Amino acid sequence: MNDTDLPRALRYPTPELPLLGRTVLIVEDSRLTCEAVRMLCQRSGARIRRADSLAAADRHLRVYRPTVLLVDLGLPDGSGLDLIRRITRSPRLIDVVVAISGDDSQEQAATHAGADGFMAKPLTSLASFQEMILQQLPGDQRPLEPRAVNDTRIRPDPMIYAEDLRHAAKLLEQGMDADTLDYVVQFLLSLSHSAQDHALHTACLRLDAVASTCAPRPPRPIAMQTVQALLHKRLAAVAEA
């Protein structure tokens, strides 16, 4: 059974589920952020699909037409800005395109690329998530009655944070070029910001500064060892829990 088989009343948004019947495609490489969006969608009535790269997003978009596209700006195979430009400059088939990033200084670039809105990580506020999308949707896709404002804050399972850390640790242990290192550092900066892991965030800032002075060769400094040690410490704590 597909969506068109469902009675219209079951798919129409309600004050309690203002995104009922809508589909969100999130293009995001962090499992932590994807889990946060899944929880926000669940509490809003929306369905969710995930793509972890630009290539995966293209595969989804060849088959599905989401109502909402959430695009992380730092992806493993390129910038989310490129996807936003392509989607918004071709005939619009997606109602809402929103950029997301752990770096709020990217908002202007996202707007220039054509994004309808920008959300800074971490994504925790249900009310803010719903409002960002609803204000961009056509009027006939919004609830007929006033929305029940819900100030719930969501908290993803810490184990999902560990999955992201494990992925980053494996990449750092492998030999990599400067571009790959830059991706991993930016991934960890955004991730640690979302998780409010201040020690890891500070260590990644230092590594980012050192790496920029060592380009085009990846650095082998104390800064790298510090980040790796913190990753191993976090993962060991999860294993012992």
Image (cartoon, rainbow, N blue to C red):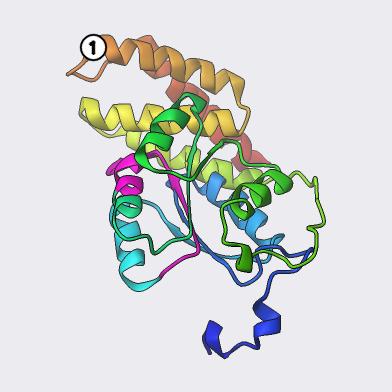
What count of labels does the image hold? 1
Residue 236's image quarter?
A: top right
Q: Residue 109, relative to residue 52: is it above or below?
A: above
Q: Give the labeled residue for mark 1.
A: 214
- Residue 226 forms part of the magenta stretch: no
Within 10 Å of disc 1 (Cα), the crowding (few <14, some 14-19, many 20+) is few
The structure residue drawn at horizontal position 73% and vertical position 47%, both measured from the top left corner, is 127
Query: Quick one: quadrant of the C terminus?
Result: top right
Query: Toward the viewer: 76 or 110?
Result: 110
- Residue 67 forms part of the magenta stretch: yes
The structure residue drawn at horizontal position 42% and vertical position 46%, both measured from the top left corner, is 29
Amino acid on which the number 1 mark rests in the picture: Cys
Q: Which residues are magenta?
A: 65-85
**x and y percentages locating residue 80 in the rendered image:** 35, 43
**x and y percentages locating residue 187 in the rendered image:** 42, 34
**x and y percentages locating residue 66 in the rendered image:** 46, 65
Question: Does residue 175 appear in the picture of this structure?
Answer: yes
Question: Does residue 75 appear in the picture of this structure?
Answer: no
Residue 9's image quarter?
A: bottom right
**x and y percentages locating residue 33 in the rendered image:** 55, 45
The structure residue drawn at horizontal position 37% and vertical position 38%, both measured from the top left corner, is 170
Query: Toward the viewer: 80 or 155?
Result: 80
